Amino acid sequence: MSSPTPPTDPGFVDVTFTVEPNYAGWRLDRYLCEKIRRLSRTRVRRILERSLVSDRPLKPSTRVRPGLTFTLRRRAQAEPEVPEDVVELYLDASLLVLDKPAGLPIHPTARYHHNTLVKLLERRHGPSLRADPAHRLDRETSGLLVCGRGAESSRALMRAFQSGEVHKEYLAVVEGHPPDTFAVDAPIAEGTAEVRIAVRIDRRAGKPARTAFAVERRFRRDGEPFALLRCLPETGRQHQIRIHAREAGFPLVGDKIYGPDPGYFDRFSKRCLEPEAWERLRLPRHALHAARLEFPHPLTGARLGFDSPLPPDLSDFCLAAAGSGEVGEVATSPLLTAA
């Protein structure tokens, strides 16, 4: 599809997509729904009709193949500022491992184009460094992210995630007083009546999902109980830790989707979340951090392991009560001995 607007027009932004190996055979509209998760299938189809730029005819129903590249052209908008303090922990010809700050989206979306991890890496290293994230971290989630460099490495990493060869551990700050160890085994399905990008527990239509939890620290703030949990997802569903923690009765601090009120996210998206809601959330982002990652090197098969400490915003929240004498006990659990 051609466009009357040249790509260099400063009033427009080109968002280019290159289909990764694990999306082979998907419909084009479904692929974009996966990449731009806040958009409905109907809206994606409208965007394709008016914004698609490609060197071959493409329709919403077109089955995509790995390496297919196309562009969506849209009018430029002011983007929110994002943190850029990405730490590169490991880099070789096949692999890039990063420590991502909270607030930085990985891929271009409807709101973000230049201020994304992918674009930041391009500015830092130039277009020659191709690094495809092998898994998801939400914009508000901080911590470890592994990227494959090249199609072969990306496919190997995808297979490792799908076959359970990757070990992941997260740290989460939750409300309440959970037991020392517990697990949630609850199937997850996509979509809720309140938030389209949310997930729900659905024991009939959901996909199997299980998460183990262990308390690392309990503490109190303003008389209310909280805990720092180590979370071990045994499956890799979207928002799994967040909804499983809520299912157990211990929602994440700062969670605008699975926290105190599902209406928070809609008002936050419209930039009209009231001060009382921010006070109830206690943190400006959900308190989840990808703390440990173990996986086989995509080329050599050697087992690699990386750790990321709890970032200052979450550690400060946990430790700020220390001066008031409200910090509780540190739990000891077999699940924590390898951490």
Image (cartoon, grey):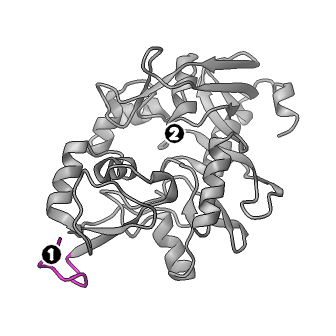
Using the image, determine if residue 56 lies above or below residue 33.
Answer: below
Under circle 2, the secondary element is: loop
Q: Position of residue 181 (x, y in %)?
A: 75, 19
Q: Position of residue 288 (x, y in %)?
A: 59, 40
- Residue in the picture at 74% in, 64% down: 299
Q: Position of residue 70 (x, y in %)?
A: 32, 68
From mark 2 to mark 1, how far is it between C-alphas? 40 Å
What's under tag 2, amino acid-wise?
Answer: His
Q: Position of residue 149 (x, y in %)?
A: 61, 69
The number of numbered discs placed on residues in the rendered structure image is: 2
The secondary structure making up most of the magenta span is loop
Using the image, determine if residue 192 lies above or below residue 39.
Answer: above
- Residue in the picture at 25% in, 71% down: 56
Q: Nearer the viewer, residue 166 or 201?
A: 166
Residue beneath label 2, please? Answer: 286
Residue beneath label 1, please? Answer: 3
Q: Is residue 100 left or right of residue 81?
A: right
N-terminal of the pair, mark 2 or mark 1, is 1
Using the image, determine if residue 151 lies above or below residue 125.
Answer: above
Residue 5 lies within the magenta run: yes
- Residue in the picture at 36% in, 37% down: 197
Splitting the image into 4 quarters, where does residue 211 fall? top right
Question: Can you say which quadrant of the picture contains the N terminus?
Answer: bottom left
- Specify few, some or many for label 2: CA neighbours under 10 Å numbering under 14, 14-19, or 20 or more: many
What's drawn in magenta, residue-wise? Answer: 1-11
Residue 329 lies within the magenta run: no
